[in-house]
Image (cartoon, coloured by chain):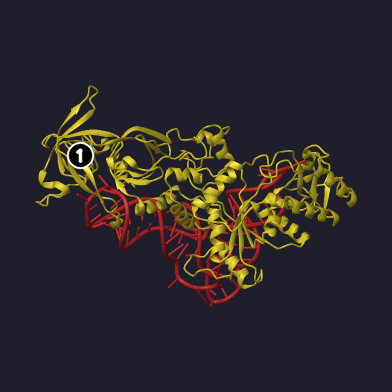
Chain colours: A yellow, B red
Amino acid sequence: MAVNAPPPESRPSNFLRDIMAEDVSSNRYGKAPIQTRFPPEPNGYLHIGHAKAICIDFGLADDFCGKTNLRFDDTNPEKEETEYVESIQEDVRWLGFDWERLCYASDYFDQLYEWALKLIRDGKAYVCDLTAEQVREYRGTLTEPGKNSPYRNRAIAENLDLFQRMKAGEFPDGARTLRAKIDMASPNLNMRDPVMYRILRAEHHRTGNKWCIYATYDWAHGQSDSIENVTHSMCSLEFADHQPLYNWFIEQLGIFPSRQIEFDRLAITYTLLSKRKLLRLVNEKRVAGWTDPRMPTLSGMRRRGYTPEAIRNFVAAVGVSRTNGIVELAMLEHFLREDLNKRAPRVMAVLKPLKVVIDNYPKGQVEEAEAVNNPEDASAGTRKVPFSRELYIEQDDFREVPPKGYYRLSPGREVRLRYGYFITCNSVVKNDAGEVVEVHCAYDPATKGGNAPDGRKVKSTIHWVSASHAIDAEVRIYENLFSKEDPNDAAAGQDFIANLNPHSLEVIANAKLEPSLAKAAPGSRYQFERLGYFCVDPDSQLGKLVFNRTVALKDTWAKVEKKHGGR
RNA sequence: UGGGCCGUCGACUAAUGGUAGGUCAAGUGCCUUUGGAGCACUUUGUCUAGGUUCGAAUCCUAGCGGCCCAGCCA
């Protein structure tokens, strides 16, 4: 029913789309619709590297009016869990994709078994009694050919009998394997009689204890693709050496000829994208689980405040090729800010409070300043923010001795309180340690709303909250989880654990927020003006809000400060 | 070392034998009630050497460099 459409002209080209377009125009699959699949193994949570694969698998199929299945590649019961199959579905949906069919490689265990029998009957597979270690020895090396297994020429009837008894559970784990009979001298090691089945007594999250033999990736993947009529099976570059084997099985069986195409994995600076290593961070409690906001998992990023749109835009901008590159984290952050800038309501919050007393403002008086909710979106409207004699401003927004290029408050200097008044600092109060703990100012009543009738200008506008109206909140500030661009670049004898950033989480226990935030719901995102984007963490409770900093705003002052060598 | 894949601005990626372009980053200026956002402008690139061709990032050869493969993981 689906008609294969040519790709839209507007999109930048990529080699995958080109291949698919060629296959469509050359009628490689006749009238069969384009079909792809996203095939995660349920052995961990999805991360942003998977987001790239998801966007490719679903996006490309969509470009050609095709369909995409979500298929769990669950052929190794020792590592797979239901928790993971659930989180994966949630994450794919959250990213904005919906699958045609939900499948499991384990759906095909019976069919795979039948096909294995066929290969045995055709003399293309045999039961091998070599131990794992012997198999390795017989395989040869990168430069030397392998040797034939002594069991390679077993009679078909014997192979059939042995294989059926493997399935029946007559042999202990690891005692025998079923191997494809291909070529022990092939320069491609994957073709040196690869193992198709191993004996493994482990409870499978779906098939329970029905099976004690499990298909390997090579035997399961291509056949699963074929069963689902997958036309284009995209996978990452490291599988390129498996493609001849992928094709060999399909040819021997004479089944639907799915085509494997490899592309490069996503890599990002300061980020680890390996399920195995992320699992270690979780198991060793280096982070608070898979959903820790510092994790590159989709669930961690979601909790951190990322939007699916930001991730999709990033993935699209990164593109796809066959080179092994590393994208700068700055690029991800750009697309995050770009999206949040459009959608996040602005709000005032003070992370590190410094008390400001406006000496000439009437005691007990409260005014309501009208604040714009989102300058990027007029329809977001305005809100009222209480203003009074005692306020909090950011400690960073006052300097007793202003460094070069510093525009904010300092003794004798006038600044604007956003949506409030111009104030001038007259004096400071210090504690015993000599630190400024209170700043005394005078306001100009004529500048209400933030404009001086005489046209006088100030160099900076700072945010504030009314001390008596502010609500307290915990704010969690995140930095990169790793302090090295390449987390794996560790000294001899060390690994990525050594590159963990000890300052990746800073908890601010008593931030002061404007009262409009009192009922902010978990998951909602805001821009704390001049600071960054923040979202409400699910740890929040009534009266005890917890915010995560999603990403800081671009900080021009930080650059200036760095250049001047200021503090 | 055998095989496979790949080398385009600092990063990612287009150009499919015919003007090396885009995004990020960096820089400059404008604007600004967020040192935010926005706008304008600028810098920097085809790994090297040969060859084919009127013309090469693109095709060929060689070299150099990087990544992947010796799990009964995926």
**Which quarter of the figure has residue A531?**
top left
Q: Position of residue A328 (x, y in %)?
A: 46, 49
Farthest residue to the top: give it.
A432
Res A321 seen here: no
Q: Is residue B52 left or right of residue A503?
A: right
Compared with A39, A540 (above or below) is: above
Compared with A489, A452 (above or below) is: below
Quadrant of the image for the C terminus of chain A? top left
Res A190 seen here: yes
Secondary structure, mark 1, is: loop
Chain letter for mark 1: A
Residue type at mark 1? Answer: Leu
Q: Is residue A562 left or right of residue A214?
A: left
Q: Position of residue A234 (x, y in %)?
A: 61, 57
Name the one closer to the observer, A100 or A162: A100
Q: Is residue A299 left or right of residue A181?
A: left
Q: Is residue A134 left or right of residue A314?
A: right
What residue is disc 1 on? A409
**Which residue is at a point 79% across and 42% down the rendered structure image?**
A135
**Which residue is at a point 82% across and 56% down the rendered structure image?**
A118
